[in-house]
């Protein structure tokens, strides 16, 4: 683990450095910085450390000014002789607020807290990644639609296509049932798996399994025939024809 110490009093910085190394010799203190300016310069030129130890009242101002100039993404442990800044400290990535002189046992408790937080968020992040990698994990599985006075749930796999008409958006399932939705095609498209649904033009968003035939159309366009059938030509533009054929061939 790499950390930096931001402290303008040399004796305090040296004492904190020794205490950190005593707590965990594996921790590498990569820099000891005495001011807002030197901290900003260092952080602009180096990777963000895993953890920062930060005094608040530095020789050229409050260390909170560093956050105005640098997007600090690492947690911070504030070490200060003053207790009036604690509330503001916790608005700046703080995981603890230690009063000087920093006691060894307090430091050990704080570093243990940091390790527990790191393990917790690493585990949560891994679970999130695994969930996101599951096929269809982020896509709608069904649509709740109204039929008369009742609401029914339609599985996404049973939908043939969506289309826009007269400022309305309709959904048609593979049994030719039609339902009116209160969302735009653009919003609906965001929640559908692009491996299964394609926005063939401004009016139609079509499920792959509903496409029965593709035919050549004048001016290098394509005509898409779907089931259930529609009373108008569904045309893919010349500009979109190549991408549509590539999607069909995946």
Image (spheres, helix red, strand yellow):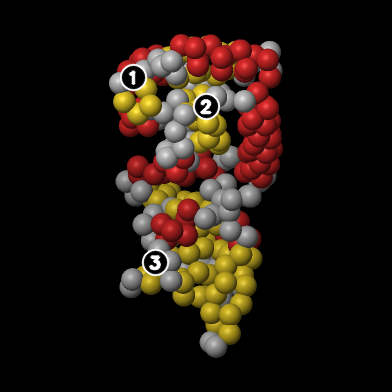
Residue bearing the label numbered 1: 59
Label 3 sits on a secondary structure element that is: strand
The answer to which of marks 2 and 1 sits earlier in the sequence is 1
The Cα atoms of the two marked residues, 2 and 1, are separated by 17 Å
Q: Residue at x 35, y 42 (%)?
A: 239
Q: Residue at x 54, y 32 (%)?
A: 98
Viewer-nearest of labels 2 and 3? 2
The Cα atoms of the two marked residues, 2 and 3, are separated by 67 Å
Q: Is any atom of residue 37 visible in this view?
A: yes
Position of 162 with respect to 102 (left or right) is left
Residue bearing the label numbered 3: 164
Q: Residue at x 41, y 16 (%)?
A: 8
* Mark 1 closeness class: few <14, some 14–19, many ≥20 residues within 10 Å: some
Please state the horizontal and vertical placement of residue 86, each as a whole percent of the image.
46, 40
Residue bearing the label numbered 2: 100
Circles 1, 3 touching at the beta carbon (< 8 Å): no
Q: Quadrant of the N terminus?
A: top right
Viewer-nearest of labels 1 and 3? 1
- Which quadrant holds residue 101? top right
């Amino acid at each position: 683990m790499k950390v930096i110490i931001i402290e303008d009093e040399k004796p305090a910085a040296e004492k904190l450095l020794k205490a950190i190394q005593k707590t965990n010799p594996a921790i590498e203190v990569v820099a000891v910085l005495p001011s807002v300016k030197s901290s900003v310069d260092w952080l602009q030129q180096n990777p963000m450390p895993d953890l920062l130890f930060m005094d608040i009242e530095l020789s050229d101002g409050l260390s909170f000014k560093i956050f105005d100039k640098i997007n600090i993404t690492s947690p911070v442990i504030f070490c200060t002789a003053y207790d009036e800044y604690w509330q503001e400290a916790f608005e700046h990535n703080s995981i603890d607020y230690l009063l000087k002189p920093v006691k060894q046992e307090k430091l050990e408790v704080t570093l243990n807290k940091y390790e527990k937080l790191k393990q917790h968020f690493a585990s949560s992040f891994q679970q999130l990644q695994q969930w996101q990698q599951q096929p269809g994990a982020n896509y709608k599985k069904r649509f709740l639609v109204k039929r008369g006075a009742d609401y029914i749930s339609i599985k996404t796999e049973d939908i043939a296509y969506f289309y826009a008409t007269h400022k309305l958006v309709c959904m048609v399932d593979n049994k030719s049932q039609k339902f009116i939705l209160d969302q735009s095609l653009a919003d609906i498209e965001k929640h559908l798996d692009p491996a299964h649904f394609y926005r063939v033009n401004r009016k139609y968003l079509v499920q792959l399994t509903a496409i029965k035939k593709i035919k050549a159309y004048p001016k290098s366009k394509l005509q898409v025939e779907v089931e259930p059938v529609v009373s108008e030509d569904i045309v893919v533009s010349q500009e979109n024809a190549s991408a549509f054929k590539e999607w069909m061939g995946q």
